[in-house]
Amino acid sequence: MATLADWIEGARLRTLPAAVAPVILGSGAAIGLGSFSLPRALLAAIVALALQVGVNYANDYSDGIRGTDDNRSGPPRLTGGGLTAPANVQRAALACFAIAALAGLVLVILARQPWLIAIGVAAIIAAWFYTGGKKPYGYLGLGEVFVFIFFGLVATAGTTYTQALTVPWTVWAGASGIGLIACAILMANNIRDIPTDAVTGKHTLAVRLGDRRARYAFVAMIMGAIALAVLTAIAHPGALILLALIVPAWFIIKPVPAGATGKELIAVLRDTGFFELLYAFALALVFAL
């Protein structure tokens, strides 16, 4: 029987910065626009966190019943590791999606923008079919597309829009940077799993690129995010301070092209999550001021 610690591990806490960072950045922009709303920001955070944990449990369930996680190199999964019945993991995923949907509905009502419901539905559908269904797009190398769109553009711009009802181009640039870092988190995870994923037919972008090119793609994602943040200096000169992020980025990036594997890549994944939070806080402060 799975313990509480097993369920917490299954929620993959290392990935949660990818859910919180967009809300921080989007809310910082809302402050700068004079439209910040704490209740709406908190609701956006609940949506993002519930969706992130939900997709993590959904992946655990879908990968587990396919046998993808039978010989993985990372921590054991709830389903693939036989820690609990697959149906329990599926219920946990659906419960998280329900929480995200409820919080999102309240947010839409407060923002008085009913068309946003369609985006919320699309996000939940995309979260499930990442590894679920007969032809999961995560097995086709399209996982980064989902992450970039929903945990970058939609989460960041959506947070700003539900508070300010407008999204300046600088927010779209920052949202793209957030999306790239979130993709880097996924890439680090998938580089670690290339040997087992390739055998089980899970053709992630890392598998399709191959080990060496996937590692350089990780570097490009991190550096691209910094470049996008600096680009916003056209409207917010203070954004030039984000050039300082090159220093922590270097320490995060360095082990990847050098051939980091296993636990080393788990550390990279964790550190990239913290880097995303730092990026969001720094750019949010620039936008807010």
Image (cartoon, rainbow, N blue to C red):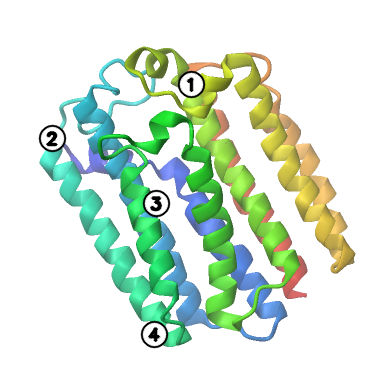
Q: Secondary structure at mark 4?
A: helix
| Vertical order, 101 against 6 (above or below) | below
Q: Label 1 is placed on what type of residue?
A: Arg
In the rendered structure, the answer to whether residue 15 lies left or right of residue 169 reads left
Q: Report the quarter where the N terminus lies.
A: top left
The residue labelled by disc 3 is 52
> Distance from label 4 to label 2 (Cα)?
38 Å
Going from N to C along the chain, the mark reached first, 2 or 1, is 2
Between disc 3 and disc 2, the foreground one is 3
Q: Label 3 is placed on what type of residue?
A: Gln
Q: Going 64% across and 79% down the picture, which residue do you hit?
A: 166
Q: Which mark is residue 109?
A: 4
> Distance from label 2 to label 1 (Cα)?
24 Å
> Distance from label 1 to label 3 (Cα)?
20 Å
Going from N to C along the chain, the mark reached first, 1 or 3, is 3
| Vertical order, 166 against 213 (above or below) | below
Query: Mark 1, residues whose alpha carbon is within 10 Å: few (<14), some, or many (≥20)?
Result: many
Q: Going 40% across and 37% down the picture, which residue do you hit?
A: 137
